[in-house]
Amino acid sequence: MNDDWDAVEHVFDIQPDKLYAYVTYRLETPLHIAIGTNSSHLFVNKIIERISDTDDQKLRTTSQGGNTALHYAAKVGNTIDAKLLVAKAPGIAQMVNEDGDTALKLAAQYGRLETLWYLLEVTMDEPREDGTSPYTGVSGANLIILTLTAGFCDVALYLVKRYPDLVTQKDKEGQIALQVLATKPHVFPSGSQLRFYQLLIYTCIHVNLEKTSGHRLASFVSKFILLIAPCAKDIYNMKLKHAQTLKLVEQMCSVVIEKGSHAIAWEVLGTAVSTAVKNGIYELIKICVETYPDILWYEDEGFYLLLSAVRYRQEKVFNLVYQMTGHKVFAATVHNPNGDNPLHIAARLSPLPRLKTVSGAALQMQRELQWFKEVEKHVEPLYKDALNKDHKTPRAVFTEEHKDLLEEGEAWMKDTSSSSTVVGALVVTMAFAAAFTVPGGNNSVGLPLFLRDKTFLLFIVSDAIALFASTNSVLMFLAILTSRYAEEDFFYALPKRMMIALVSLFLSLAATMIAFSATLAILLHDEIAWIAAPVTLFASVPVTLFAMLQFPLLVELVYSTYGPSIFKKKMYD
């Protein structure tokens, strides 16, 4: 384990059989242990040389579970020693353990990319005793699915190009590769959350799959971006993976169509599309529908594609399907087996994972209303008041399903407003009192002594702003507290009032701190001239804290209420 060959070399000189003796309870030899460290490369090299000089069959000695030393190298990603083993013991890459796993499969299972690429070169497509090879049947399906699970889309693309039949093979769990890929949103562009500057870099970087090798950038512009923005390399690798993934989906769909079988296309593409809907991967759905348009009518638990998008609240999928098909009106007005029309489906509560993508019960209620109103635009007028099997209209279903969420939203609004009203009222009191007890006092005729001082003007203006803003915030919070809290109020009225109230409260606090700083500057200017800077600095602390704590909520309120709709009107290119 310490790569200390000199310490035991004399033992192997005297007793050569110790080279391949079992030294642990799990029947591991020194070679298994040394390779498993992924660091004792000298030790491994010396052992392999000695064993291969006498009997290279001993290099194939297995531990408990039938694992060779190459299986250990695959698990830990020891490519250096894997190459030594294969060079000295040809055919070891074809050996399977008691679970029927080759070293190649274990490299994919444990996510060892470098070792996986090497083992792909040396593991032959040769049939075993059962007639299968590492690249066919269940074994082949397991291999490509494990590769996709690890996120190695470039390896999967290589496998599909070389062994196309893997696309339609099922693994031991009955899964198909494209279906598993549909559970991996992070390997698709739509599943990556990028900030503005990252998105800008992502857009500017060019990726060419035909010319790209490793991690080299494909154009002068890309190289320049990498030079000025080191983080661009990660973004480039991300974009490269996205390009490989989309190419992989296209290749898989092409293989399916070449089979010329509706049954195969229905099973492979249908299961993939239904899975992609749940995960919001619209890119995969777009390619599948363009390849085989009939897949639009694939049923998942009685729901067509468009209805599934509504059911799982996947707005990107909804936008895509509604815009790309000429049957959209029909698709939006089909009943499902439960007797619900599309508006009934939109009226039901979102699945919890999708509901939690929006923070706060009030904004969650707003998002639910947005979905309901959007679907309402696309159904026939007859369905807006249609009854389902429980004799309920879509609106009645919405009210029943969102009863708890409505109460939670009301409680959050009231708690926030009650706490903020106290602060606002306190600022009103201070600002009102400060207006009549100005710094320095008044002269005999009632005029402020510092009336001619410019700093006094700053004080009186900021105090007036504080009074007006705090009064406005208190009124808005009171309007929220006395609201009727109907469902429709959460769509626009309540979020608007909360935004106005929060902005007003922030302005009042900032103006109050400015007035306080101006007062100290006026009173202490002649005695302590340097007081203005530290006072201003400390006065900015509470204002900054308030902004940091409340700004994310304010941004989310503004974006959700006034920002671009989640239902896009443009086509996806």
Image: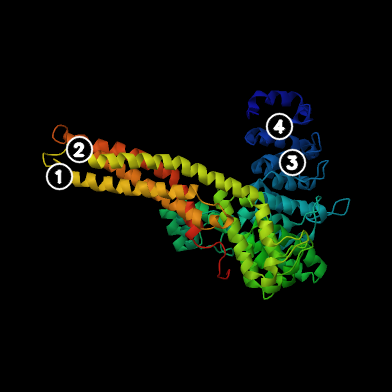
Whichever of callouts 3 and 2 sits on the residue coming sooner in the sequence is 3
Residue depicted at x 57% and y 48%? 409
**Where residue 28 sits in the image (x, y, percent)?**
76, 31
Q: CA distance from mark 4 to mark 2?
A: 81 Å
**Mark 3 burial class by Cα count in 10 Å: few <14, some 14-19, many 20+:** many
Which of label 1 and label 3 is nearer to you? 1
Task: Tell me how far mark 4 sits from mark 3, CA to CA.
Answer: 12 Å
Which of the 4 quarters of the picture holds residue 225? Answer: bottom left
Q: Secondary structure at mark 4?
A: helix
Label 3 secondary element: helix
Q: At which x and y percent is residue 109? A: 71, 45
Residue assigned mark 1: 451
How many callouts does the rendering have?
4
Q: Nearer the viewer, residue 249 or 114?
A: 249
Would you say the residues marked 1 and 3 are in contact, meaning their CB atoms lie under 8 Å apart?
Answer: no
Residue 33 is tagged as: 4
Q: Considering only order in the chain, which callout, 3 or 4, is on the residue closer to the N terminus? A: 4
Separation (CA) of disc 1 from disc 3: 87 Å
Check disc 1 and report its element: helix, strand or loop.
Answer: loop
Q: Earlier in the sequence, mark 2 or mark 1?
A: 2
- Residue at image mark 2: 439
Q: Residue 71: which disc?
A: 3
Query: The disc labelled 4 sits on which kind of residue?
Result: Ile
Which class describes the residues within 10 Å of circle 1: few (<14), some (14-19), or many (20+)?
some
Amino acid at pointer 2: Pro
Tell me the residue at 58%/55% (across/down). 487
What amino acid is found at the position of numbered circle 1 in the picture? Answer: Leu
